[in-house]
Amino acid sequence: MNALWPLLRLRIHRDRVQLPIWIAVFFGLAALVVFAVDSSFGTSIERQALMRIAVGSPTILIFRGEPQGADVDAVAFFLIFAFLATLVAFMSTFLAVRHTRAEEESGRFELIAATPAGRLIPLLATALHGIVAALAAGLAVALGLLAGGLDGAGSTTTGGAVAGTGIAFLGVGLLAGQVMHTSRGANGLGAALIGLAYTLRAFGDAGGTASADGLSMSSAWPSWLSPIGWGQQTEAFTTNRPAPLALDLALAAVLFAVVVLLQSRRDLGTSLIGERPGPQHAPRTLSGSLGLAWRLQRAPMIGWALAGLVFGVLAGTLGETVVELVQSSAQVGEALARMAGGRASIIDLFTDTIFGLVGVIAAAAATQAMIRLRQEEANGSAELLLALPLRRGRWIFDYLLVGTVSIALVLLGAAGGAAAGLASSSEVAGTADTTARVASAAASGVAQAPAALLVLAIAALLVAFVPRLSTGLSWGVLFVSAFIGEFGELFGLPDWLLNLSPFTHTPTIGAADVDSSGAWWMLGLALAGAVAAGVGIRRRDLAL
Amino acid sequence: MSSVIETRGLKKRFGRVRALDGLDLTVASGEVHGFLGPNGAGKSTTIRVLLGLYRPSGGTATVFGQNPWSDAVALHRRIAYVPGDVSLWPNLSGGEAIDLLCRLRGGTLDAAAYRDRRAHLVDAFQLDPTKKGRTYSKGNRQKVALIAALAAPVDLFILDEPTSGLDPLMDAVFRRELQAATSEGATVLLSSHILSEVEHLCDRVSIIRAGRTVETGTLAQLRHLTRTEVAFASTGLTDADLAGLAARIPAAHDLVLGNGTPRAGIPRAGTARVSFTADSDALPEVLPVLADLRVQGLTVAPPSLETLFLRHYREDAPSPAPSTGPLP
């Protein structure tokens, strides 16, 4: 047991940058949601309108939660909790996998397990570390809500619910680390289980029973199968019941017992689902750097395209609901119009707003493709490649191509999803209006491409000229650009700052007159950037 | 013989660190050239310059008479490289990695020959090509890179400690396969720490230290640089005999008499020993004197590369003296 404290300290030390960022994000989101509710739905009438629409539209319930009246605090909890719970679930599963399966995969666990710490103490240290992190996230949420001016009991309940969800998913992450052979696989399984938990509560909330006043609901049984649902069932700020959190702790305890059992019985380097052997020979497609880049990015690309599809469906099905919302509240309509930057058909504007997010997803997919090249270089496999007759310009071009295809797939998925959503929507289906809406959605999709391509080109430039900093800088550029693009106008940032983000130059489809000059400029810059990156990477040393 | 690799005063700086500081290296066509030096001497840096992965900060380097930086792609068609620490793609099987590397080099153009050669090597190295890159041990990753390098004919092999992590059996396979490749006329630059490997495979050797060449020559030439160690028991010899020894053997160096300061490695249980070192070519003059003295327990240790390498590898060794520079 003497080994526990050093191992716990090692974990805290390794996460000393990452965890504080997570916790700051939790605090910030909790504090901001109160501000957002106050500014967007300031009056009780507006909030009642919002909640009535929410209770009546399953699509909103799927993405939010269980309506509990129209008070500011209850509305805030309704809007934000599912999101906070999902975030903390990711934080916990990633943490669990990072300190268990990833360590085992890298061989570091072998070093530790050979000391008196053995095989189980590191696991215990990871569990304690994860519990501390989850509690810290919960505390940050509670403090954030308090800072926003909400009452202590509800804030504490919300914080407790976030911490409880985090602890439950810590168990999920530890289990995923026992089941899967690689940290990538374990993270994937963890994410899939988070998705399942989110979907279960989405069904539960969408299928709930509305109260007489039409402002609250009680969720259907599927919510009670999901740790995220349990958190919502605390009904913070209304009934404040902590009992459902016992389910979180019980789940965590059961999962941890299973994990200890597995860990104490299995050999080092094994997992419940073993590694499948690969093919003896390479397929015909794997015969050059393009084939390799495609193969390496194939699975993530499918994931990004699915994300695009989900947002597309969301854009396609939510349109009508938004029209209702806008008709019930002048201020909301104005806010939406402000975000979209014009005064045209609200549905098209709304679709375009959602497509703005799709554009960010496309840019993220492209950034990841380019960062893959850098990872190839950093982990040493590029040394094997570049000692072959492969032009470096060709090498980076292949990743630019895969990045471009990623963008296309995300946008195609989103446009397809929007079309399917619009076609299935009862009121407009089969009319000429639907055709116009689908065309508008497709145009919105195409409009996102130039900004995403520019972000891709920037990532390529960073890889070519500042390889060692490029991973962090590329994601940083994407994050800052996306933030300015999505929230810049809302926060009233100065024009010069707004103009720095590619996303603010994306043409607004649905606006009175579509200005596409920005798009052409961005395409030109992206092309120039790609060429410069191709030249730059030929001029530098291999950077291991 | 024309030279395949030629560097003159090669320099490479990383910030303030001088990884290469005027390195001279000549590898003639068709030879197996051993490339030795302590860790951090600049072996891998030199190799990366020769592969066009690093751009030299000064001096010249040519491979097949071409510039390794600007003519990299053309040169790489003729070169096979095995890095010291092979990183494979985690989710590609070993077989896929071998095929990918060979296809990129253009070594699979003769499909039938490639297939046979690859099958032979996979069998000889006892590699399971269906395992994923992430599950291979270091030795097995090394095998993947070796098979990819040997599976198609090339003009130049650049091997950076290629056998690190291989067991002795696989080591022997590697030597056999490399010799088969060189018998077809390929040139090899082999960086290694394993002296038996160097003795076994290499025609000529360059030793570098702190980014500079300190010794170049054939193994025979290098052996001349080391002295033979001679030792015998001092029992039955008079003090006068011993005192006269230095005068009678002018070729003797580092003479230690039996009652002198103890030296490590010389057994002295019960009886004292006399030891000295002699230039290897002076040995014929030494032996009659020893016979005359009727010495007992005579040991004559042949010049070992180890001694030579240790002399150059040691941190406190004096800076390379220009006089011992490259031999003809």
Image (cartoon, coloured by chain):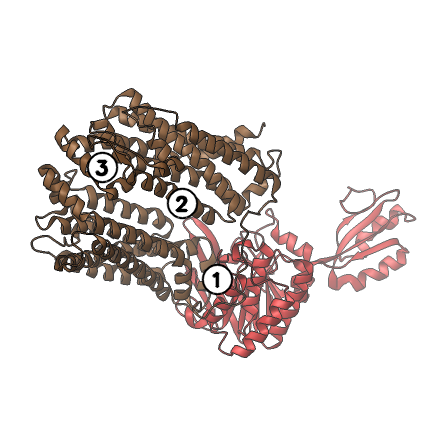
Q: Which mark is residue A252?
A: none
- Locate residue B66, reporting x and y percent: 44, 72
Q: Pointer 1 indicates a residue of which chain?
A: A
Q: Is residue A196 left or right of residue B1?
A: left
Q: Mark 3 belongs to which amino acid?
A: Val
Q: Pointer 3 indicates a residue of which chain?
A: A
Q: Which residue is mark 2?
A: A191
Label the red chain with its letter: B
Q: Mark 1 belongs to which amino acid?
A: Leu
To the question of a shared chain for discs 2 and 3, the answer is yes
Q: Residue furthest front?
A: A212
Q: Quadrant of residue A161?
A: top left
The residue carrying pointer 1 sits among few (fewer than 14), some (14 to 19) or many (20 or more) residues within 10 Å by Cα, namely some
Q: Which residue is mark 3?
A: A55
Q: Which residue is mark 1?
A: A384
Question: In this orientation, does residue B87 appear?
Answer: yes
Q: Residue at x 85, y 55 (%)?
A: B298
Marker count (numbered): 3
Q: Residue furthest top?
A: A152
Q: Residue at x 19, y 41 (%)?
A: A487
Q: In this orientation, which residue lies closer to the viewer: B278 or B94?
A: B94
- Looking at the rendered image, the disc whose residue lies closer to the viewer, 2 or 3, is 3
Q: In this orientation, which residue lies closer to the viewer: A523 or B39?
A: A523
Labels 2 & 3 near each other (Cβ < 8 A): no
Q: Pointer 2 indicates a residue of which chain?
A: A
Q: Residue at x 45, y 36 (%)?
A: A170
